[in-house]
Image: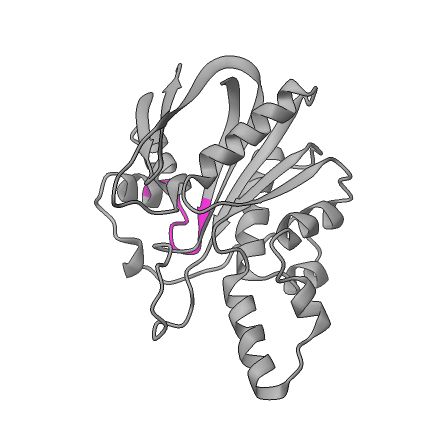
């Protein structure tokens, strides 16, 4: 599949400057040595900002850096979604036999992209994907399909945050992050999927993609347990 990568941006609670990201991509900086700071989201009213979870804040900041006030179709993908909110709901349900309807409503997988749409008054088509491993590339493929259906541009966003309770055994993203990219018609980017089988792999391919883009690498392959996605980017 071919497309034009108009703009992209990655945000994290720990890497805040271009130098931070450069050093992380080159293996100089370990994000776990830095303190967490959530995005401030100055483009939103204070009342709206206070109601957003950490994942929502990361997603909003990354997306706004890419599209600003523009409205366009959006493809959102996440492996864990609102994992920490969901866990808190389960624990509350066990203790109290009830949960907050509002918190429950915001825990569903498409709630993040729904909030993005509602708070901006954007009625464009939105898609929320739940993917095990190669979510970033699957979201790109979905966006390319929307371009073929007539969209002029499509926003792609991936966001995940680690489970906040270390005593629970689980595979966790290395740190909270969100990656956003704006796709348009063109052929300077080519993405190809190949069948692939390996015993190891993780689900934060959007972070690996960010690292490739920062190094920068114009030809690279992202490997997952059941697939390999080959990227070719013309500078």
At 70% from the left edge and 59% from the top edge, which residue is drawn? 48
In terms of image quadrants, where is residue 82? bottom right
Seen from the viewer's position, the closer of residues 107 and 62 is: 107
At 50% from the left edge and 59% from the top edge, which residue is drawn? 38
Q: Is residue 91 left or right of residue 15?
A: right
The relative height of residue 73 versus residue 23 in the rendered view (above or below) is above
Picture coordinates of residue 201 (x, y %)?
A: 30, 45
Quadrant occupied by the C terminus = top left
Picture coordinates of residue 216 (x, y %)?
A: 31, 27
Q: Give the farthest residue toward the bottom.
A: 95
Seen from the viewer's position, the closer of residues 43 and 98 is: 98
At 49% from the left edge and 34% from the top edge, which residue is drawn? 138
Picture coordinates of residue 153 (x, y %)?
A: 64, 24
Colouring style: one colour
Residue 188 visible in this rendered orientation of the protein: yes
Q: Is residue 22 magenta?
A: no
The relative height of residue 107 versus residue 224 in the rendered view (above or below) is below
Q: Is residue 215 left or right of residue 209?
A: left
Which residues are drawn in magenta? 11-19
At 75% from the left edge and 49% from the top edge, which residue is drawn? 118
Q: Is residue 18 magenta?
A: yes
Residue 40 visible in this rendered orientation of the protein: no
Seen from the viewer's position, the closer of residues 180 and 65 is: 180
Seen from the viewer's position, the closer of residues 228 and 190 is: 228
Q: Is residue 220 left or right of residue 10?
A: left
Picture coordinates of residue 214 (x, y %)?
A: 34, 32
């Amino acid at each position: 599949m071919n497309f034009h990568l108009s703009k992209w941006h990655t945000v994290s609670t720990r890497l805040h400057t271009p130098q931070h990201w450069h050093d992380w991509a080159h293996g100089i900086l370990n994000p776990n040595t830095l303190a967490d700071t959530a995005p401030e989201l100055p483009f939103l009213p204070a009342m709206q900002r206070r109601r957003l979870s950490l994942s929502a804040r990361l997603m909003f900041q990354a997306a706004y850096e890419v599209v600003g006030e523009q409205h366009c179709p959006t493809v959102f993908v996440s492996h864990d979604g609102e994992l920490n909110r969901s866990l808190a709901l389960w624990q509350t349900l066990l203790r109290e036999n009830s949960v907050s309807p509002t918190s429950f409503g915001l825990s569903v997988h498409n709630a993040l992209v729904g909030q993005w749409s509602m708070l901006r008054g954007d009625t464009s088509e939105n898609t929320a994907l739940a993917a095990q491993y190669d979510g970033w590339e699957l979201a790109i493929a979905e966006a390319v399909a929307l371009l073929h259906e007539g969209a002029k541009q499509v926003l792609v966003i991936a966001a995940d945050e680690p489970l906040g309770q270390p005593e629970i055994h689980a595979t966790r993203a290395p740190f909270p992050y969100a990656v956003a990219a704006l796709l348009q018609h063109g052929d300077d980017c080519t993405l190809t999927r190949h069948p692939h089988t390996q015993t190891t792999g993780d689900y934060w391919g959007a972070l690996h993609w960010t690292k490739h883009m920062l190094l920068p690498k114009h030809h690279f392959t992202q490997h997952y347990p059941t697939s390999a996605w080959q990227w070719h980017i013309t500078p």
